[in-house]
Image: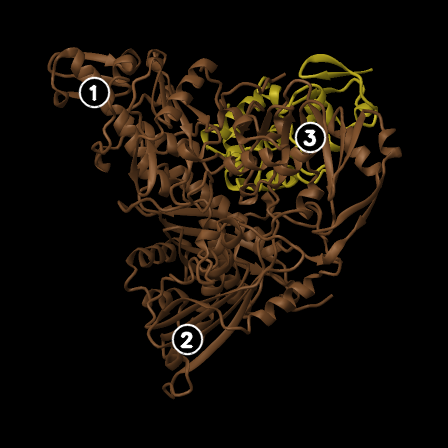
Amino acid sequence: MITLEINGERREVDVPQDMPLLWVLRDVLGLTGTKFGCGIAQCGACTVHLAGVPVRSCLLSVGSIGERAITTIEAVGTTANGMKVQKAWLDLEVIQCGYCQSGQIMSATALLDTIPKPEDADIDAAMAGNICRCGTYVRIRQAIKRAAAET
Amino acid sequence: MPNHRGSTNPVVASPVCDEFRKLSRRRFIETSAATVFVFGFSVPLRASRPAAAAATFAPNGFIRIDGQGDVTLIMPQVEMGQGTYTSISMILAEELDADWARVKVEHAPADEKLYANPDLSIQATGNSNSIRAFWKPLRVAGAATRACFIEAAAHSWHVSTAECRTENSKVIHDKSGRTLDYGSLISRAATVTPPKDPPLKDPSIFRLIGRPLKRLDTPDKVNGRARYGIDALPPGVKFATLAASPVLGGTVVHVDDRRALAVPGVRQVVVLDDVVAVVGDHMWAAKCGLEALDITWNDGPNAEVSTDLIWSQLRSASLRDGAVAKDVGDIKKALGADGEASSEVVTAAFEMPLLAHACMEPLNCTVHISPTSAEVWIGTQVMERVHAAVAKAAGLPESVVTVHNHLIGGGFGRKLEPDMAYSAARIAKHVDGPVKVVWTREEDIRHDVYRPVYHDILSARLEGARITGWKHKITGSAVMARFLPAFFQKGVDPDGVDSAQDEPYDIPNRRVEFNREEPPGIITGFWRGVGPNNNVFAVESFIDELARKAGQDPIAFRRAHLDKTPRLQAALDLVREKSGWGTPLPARCGRGVAAQIAFASFIATVVECEVDEAGEVKLRRVTSAVDTGITVNPDTVVAQLQGGLIFGLTAGLYGEITLKKGRVQQSNFHDYRMLRIDQVPQIDVHLIKSGEAPGGIGETGATASIPALRNAIYAATGVALRRMPVDRNLLATKHT
């Protein structure tokens, strides 16, 4: 048994130590908001926060997590920046198919947590790991700036 | 844990009770013979008056209203990001005069009678035609339903229908100040025979259409609640992943599954003729199990197929004469040797590579087969084909197969194929209980239905600044011949010549030929932009070369040949103004233009780029001017352009699938690259107001940006690229 703290709750899972967090969330716990995109940390669709840091859950083995708290898209809206990002995403109608957007929102929220007023270069650095096949990048950039401007 | 069982397909949580759903479904079935024909498409209108009316009012396949006045709209086209659920709902709600705040949407079930796309004749979403094809039928359905409410209210008030009007799901009688909610009228409305030809609103009084309303599908996409096919978790579901024969047409010779079965969580290995799947308690077990398998394949007849072979066959085939798609004037004379001495004939060939779709949601399908029925969870562009494919694989009649459609994590044409459902059902036949089959990204890239390779030869006679003869021969796959064979006539594939046989330039002598040549060892299909993707690239690249030969400005040259197409001229004028066309640029920077009529939209696009000495291309700015007729939701049009332009730029800069020994060589996003946010410049989209019929928009950006990029590189470097993707070696000034 492995104990994980996910979205403020302690969850016990009976899975192999080397199993990536992505599949524990999706297939064992039914938290399907975190998406599978590539399995090799190339696309960012599976991004979650581990102790506040954005990580690719497709390569993060659950056995390595320990006490660190996990936040997923299902709960990111309970944080101040997560809520701002979600609102900006809807205000600017960023989303198209939406499949990558859980990861985009997690990366964007983590960016605002570390850099409250990001410049374009900060956005590039924080978001270049998240692929959007629909091509919503122009609005993602605008929405991050919008969220950062919210007080 | 979400429960995906049940007969409804709610997108937004809906209180609709299963019983109501069944009743209204039965009503559709009972009354499907009573139809009117609108553009050759049967809009089901109710003729009988079943008792079910007390529960909900469902006068056609698209609208259901309950006693509380909640309006449920059933979506005949699928939502894969293009915003169509919102646009379709806006059209229905506009003519229905429904309260927009109380509109909910639901995925349509598999039902070709009710939901076939009028332009495609099957229940499919593609070719950027959701709004074009359903514009009239949806308006009629909404208006006819509204007429039922008016008649019901007028009857209960004993007043004439002419004295009643509607607004926000209410019938209003101004003279007496009385109002009745739609919800309170459903029983009476169900006794009214909906008019077959109800009056439609004049666009000047549209209340919803033309406004940038918020999308209905996005609130659940910011918090993880939206459900895609890959999120289906029916009770007791097991998880599987698969390996298909690495070479198309290959078969399994032997599988050693001892190590796989020892992986914790692995339950079962399913071996089919051409596919091996591992079933487990979760995807991780299935993945580890698959990696632990030792599979011996017989590669079959395509074992030696390579990219070189595909190209050499295509180029040889391009020497043949093609089937004639268009023949105007006298092309032989126009391109013959006895032309004006001052004129010249210019010829060039252009090529497009194989491309994968790489939807962000990898291919998947969940299937539960029992001896007497089958249930399917998927996100698909072809509900009825999935329905049929699963029935076939399961050996069951279609009547006992239920398909639940979902939001789609990117379609781009890949989900116009039912292959993932067919293989999932073949696997599910061997599994006790439901099984979710998820392809790895590697399988998804390597077993795609690829955008075809094309080889286009263009010749033109240039007399001064005027094109007097034009011949365009397209050699490539006939995708329609496989997908909808009835549309493939006399050797001409209507998709293959789309935006070529009807290219916009006014040229007196013109011939367009199509030459079908299917590449070996690979299946080809629709990819965002479909036929126009190739043709707009070839035409717009060639026009740019002709403009340069004629010593003309590329926009002025195009414009001079568009006197009969003022909508495209206007788009060119606007893009010239907005893009800063003609203003000075630094060295190795250039602007390229592309003009197109594709999917009945008129679009001009300018890409501005810089090419460095290593041949790397940096995008600086993209500007599009768009006339797509009446826009249902202008913000959606802008979003589709922005995204579509990036989709095309991605292909132009990186996209190419190659084969060696029959195997696709790319596998994931490290070697099949996508544009990322740090590479994407400012993109400005300008809409031109128009009262013309709506055009298509979902694919237009993809077709526009590839030639505009190519022409920008031409302007920046003088290098006339003739094939995509961009070859950096041809652009580099310093070779390392």
Q: Residues within 10 Å of mark 3 (few under 14, many from 20)?
A: many
Q: Amino acid at mark 2?
A: Gly
Work out how far the residue at label 2 is from the one at label 3, CA to CA, in angstroms.
Answer: 66 Å
User: Mark 3 highlights which residue?
Assistant: B429
The answer to whether mark 1 and mark 3 are in CB contact below 8 A is: no
- The tint of chain B in the picture is brown
Residue sitting at 52 percent across and 28 percent down? B399
In the rendered structure, which disc, 2 or 3, sits on the residue that comes first in sequence? 3
Q: Is residue B2 above or below residue B339?
A: above
Residue sitting at 53 percent across and 38 percent down? B385
* Numbered tag placed on residue B150 in the rendering: 1
In the rendered structure, which disc, 1 or 3, sits on the residue that comes first in sequence? 1
Dot 1: what SS? helix
Q: Which of the 4 image quadrants contains residue B300?
A: bottom right
Dot 3: what SS? loop
Q: Amino acid at mark 3?
A: Lys
B248 or B180: which is nearer to us? B248
User: Mark 2 highlights which residue?
Assistant: B551
Q: Are marks 1 and 3 on the same chain?
A: yes
Chain of the residue displaying label 2: B
Residue sitting at 59 percent across and 43 percent down? B677
- The tint of chain A in the picture is yellow
B382 or B692: which is nearer to us? B382
